[in-house]
Amino acid sequence: MSAATIALLGQPNSGKSTLFNALTGLRQHVGNWPGKTVEKKEGSFSWQGQDYEVADLPGSYSMSANSDEEVITRDFISSGKADVVCILADSSQLERSLFMLADYAGISVPCFLILNMADVAKEQGKRIDPKVIEEKLGIPVMLFSATDTKAYETFYQTMERAIREKSQLNVKALEQEYEKLDGYSELCAELSDADLAGFTPMWLTVKAMEQDKVVTAKLRNTLSSDAIRTMETLVKQSQGAIGTGGCKFAWIDGILDGAVTETKTKATLGKLDRIYTHKFWGKPAVVLTVLLGLLASFIPALPIMGIGAAWAMLKEPARAGLTAIHCPDIVSGLICDVGIQSIYYVINMLGFVFGVTLVFGLLEEIGIMARISYVFDNTMGKLGLQGKSVMPFLVSFGCTMGGAAGARVIDNWGQKVLTIALAWAVPCGAAWAIIPMLSTVFFGAWAPVIIVAILLTMLLHMWITAKIFSRGLVKQEDRCGMIMELPPYHKPKWGALLRYVFGRTKDTFFRVLKVVLLVSVVFWLLSYSTSGVESSFLYKIGVAIEPFTKLFGMPWQLFVAFIASSFGKEGAVGVIGALYSTGGSLYDITANGAAIEDINQILLANVTRPEALAFIFAITFNLPCIVALAATYQEIHSVKWTAKIAAYYTVTALILACIAYHIGLLIW
Amino acid sequence: MIEMDELLRLLQDGNTRTIEQLAAELQTTEADVRRQLEFLEHIGAIRRVYNSCGTCKSCSGGACKSCMPQNAELNMGELWEVVK
């Protein structure tokens, strides 16, 4: 026969399990609570010749009936199986963890309070005086570290005192807080005769106001129908859980007043965070960070481009070799102009995929991405969007399809459509591979300037698009705020980061290679003709539409590539690869008949810089790809809006191309 | 101790704030804001937002190997929104 049963009550992470294990050692058994998947841990220990039973109640936030854990906890305590309840709180954050005690107040089973993890609190510079707390609470209170074996003797004594004195929590101050709530006193009077063993009218009133389902149901069974009606009216008029919760926190603050002294100075924002969260400087700081990130991506990209250049040198020797073994023209053309050339472009693109993924993965790892997202979050509100939209935008830097699917977290349909419409303006991973590559080909060392221009255009594009689309999609009252906890800065985990970067680069390589090769073969064949390039099908059409395409500053070959980019940006590279290649195809004729060895030279000889600029802007801001289009439809379920967005992007891409072309003409 | 109504009102005005900013605006401590957020989450007044790309099965819980480096969601900060 045991002397007493002790129930351990505390929030998760209050150190309950450590205490339970230390108390019971091997004398414990673990099972399940009847009918529940919640673990049931019971055990026993001896102290001074007496046996004690211990029940480790499941960790729960409070005594409300919100979860299985909470219901089990409450039922166990109200069943009277425990002689004393040992309430645990985390000393290092008492204002938070005493909530359990506040919610327990009003239950008549004797209890005592263990301020656990005293060592952590001490490290944080907190000095806690348990005597002050004990005086206010009227129950035994002790500072404790469940990991400190020497502390257990005091624990036993505290426990024994609580059992002997049947110590009850002094709830007078808490009740005074509750009395300030509208309807509390009336309801409490109404419930004063309610016969629910183990719970005081105060506790029942508070739970009724919080609309606790179990308590409300039990009260309905015991009260008269008049009383039930009064209760329902009073509860409806009350502030509910927000009101009673506020009272509990106020009471906790009262308990801690004079009992806790903190020597540590208040934590302040770091220098970097002060800039990022600054009302005015936050935005420029973030834009600058992203820009520097993109420029830094060039550094790891350049060596890979070197590999690409080396690969391209294989082209002419390969062609010579194939001619020597009397390989048919069309086969050697396919191998050299399509095969080798496509791979050359893909390798060059990979350099940037690698660079961009690495740099942005790193920004994410060290915690800067969260700041970026925070700053954009705030801007979102002004565009009529929720802060949640920022994530689809960030994902769109990788893949627009992911961005569209990621918009699923936005419940409001209008905001979801607007988010996806804007996410399309964010250049995707394929664009970030192609733009830097083409920029380097045409503009050399000026390529970073093009990147900056693209990024600034993107911001302007998104702002204008939001203005155009938000009318009719988003209402003022749909807006809601967000709370964000910024993570601390930390060192990157290089191993995980590099695995991710290499994995992603590898995935991109195979995907891009397939598209580029396929498109390249199709267009090379379309432009192939034994009787001279002028008689090929594609050439004829191309020349016919050129007057139109020139309006947007693009020769017909680039325009065809632009059209192909609607299906997938990589496709554009395939088209360029096929239409601007040496050997029996379109362009060694125009370039003064001289054979040009270098692939880049062919492009430079046939495309002017303004034309290239127009093309780069056109494909960047064209609709992302056919899959993104499908994903958009899947998310917004509207043919009308999907078509609207797609048409809008095609038109704006051409307008941007036109503007870029004319700006280019002014420069070069 | 601040009135929780006031906190909820701030959370619905369309702005994003960090916990530090909330504490400053409500003239209280970060610990106070944090415990109230925890409470509001428990009573279902606010909820945590889990971001995912939604395109792959593996990222329903926030983590997605091909969209973000492993455990990247932990570096993105925690987000809550008001339940309407």
Image: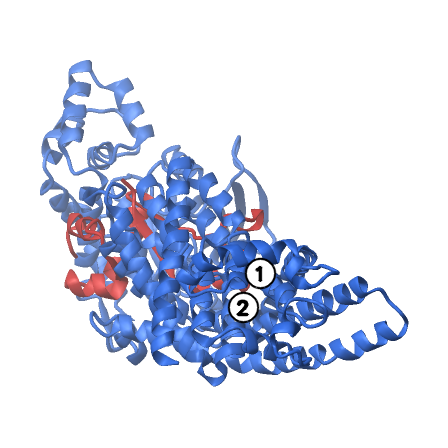
Number of marks present in the image shown: 2
In the image, A44 versus A650, the foreground residue is A650
Q: Which residue is mark 2?
A: A433
Q: Is residue A28 above or below residue B77?
A: above
Corner quadrant of residue B23: bottom left
Residue A279 in view = yes
Residue at the top extreme of this rendering: A225
The spot of residue A474 in percent (x, y) is: 25, 44
Q: Which residue is mark 1?
A: A570
Q: Earlier in the sequence, mark 1 or mark 2?
A: 2
Circles 1 and 2, Cβ within 8 Å, touching? The answer is yes
Q: Is residue A464 above or below residue A365?
A: above
Q: Secondary structure at mark 2?
A: helix
Query: Tag 1, which chain?
Result: A
Corner quadrant of residue B69: bottom right
Inspect the image, locate mark 1, and give the three-letter code of the amino acid beneath it: Glu
Query: Tag 2, which chain?
Result: A
Left or right of A93 on screen, residue B70: right
Left or right of A581 on screen, residue A35: left
Task: Write the residue at 36% across / 80% down.
Answer: A667
Task: Write the residue at 19% across / 58% down.
Answer: A253
**Mark linked to residue A206:** none
Q: Which chain is in red here?
A: B
In the image, A65 versus A424, the foreground residue is A424
The spot of residue A473 in percent (x, y) is: 27, 42
Q: CA distance from mark 1 to mark 2?
A: 9 Å
The spot of residue A492 in percent (x, y) is: 50, 75
Q: Is residue A393 above or below residue A404?
A: below
Name the colouring of the figure: by chain
In the image, A599 versus A447, the foreground residue is A599
User: Chain A's colour?
Assistant: blue
Residue at mark 1 shares a chain with residue at mark 2: yes
